[in-house]
Amino acid sequence: MWADEAGLDATQRRLDEWESSFADRAERAKALSARMRSLTGTAHSPDRTVEVTVDSAGLLVDLRLDDRVRQQSGAHTARQVISTTRAARADLLRRITAATTETLGDDDPAGPAVVDSYRRRLAPEHPTPDVGR
């Protein structure tokens, strides 16, 4: 089948490199997955009366309201919570982008795909309207 041993050796080296490349990519993907699960995003309202933290899925996990919110309307506070949650998700996306680049490097085509997937989930182009408007 092989005309010479050199051709067989070259083919074996290419297969070994290919296998090593897959193993390396799998290890980096595993490391990225573990790192992503621990990420959170946090933001404050401009007047710092509202602080929001979201988990790696963009879900609200902590909400802190300063006592000064008592001096403003409930509607105003609700708008602050919503906009601060969006800002916390933007913070999370920045952290995800940095973690992806640090873990996968700039040359891995999976990096932009991972970030784009999170971007679509965290910052939809057409946010759903508020219920009961």
Image (cartoon, rainbow, N blue to C red):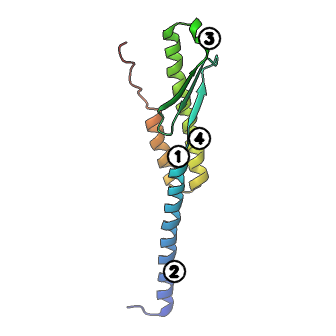
Point out which mark residue 36 bears: 1
Disc 3 is placed on an element classified as helix
- Per the model, the C-alpha gap separating discs 4 and 1 is 9 Å
Q: Is residue 16 above or below residue 109?
A: below
Question: Looking at this rendering, what residue extends furthest in the left direction?
Answer: 132
Residue on which disc 3 sits: 68
Please name which of the two marks, 1 or 3, marks the residue nearer to the observer.
3
Q: Position of residue 90 (x, y in %)?
A: 55, 33
Q: Is residue 95 above or below residue 35?
A: above
Q: Position of residue 68 (x, y in %)?
A: 62, 11
Mark sitting earlier along the chain (4/3): 3
- Per the model, the C-alpha gap separating discs 4 and 3 is 30 Å
Residue 87, quarter of picture:
top right
Disc 4 is placed on an element classified as helix
Residue on which disc 2 sits: 13
Please name which of the two marks, 4 or 1, marks the residue nearer to the observer.
1
Question: Crowdedness of circle 3 by 10 Å Cα count: few (<14), some, many (20+)?
Answer: few
Question: Crowdedness of circle 1 by 10 Å Cα count: few (<14), some, many (20+)?
Answer: some
Mark sitting earlier along the chain (4/1): 1
Question: Looking at this rendering, what residue extends furthest in the right direction?
Answer: 47
Residue on which disc 4 sits: 95
Please name which of the two marks, 4 or 3, marks the residue nearer to the observer.
3
Q: Position of residue 26 (x, y in %)?
A: 49, 61
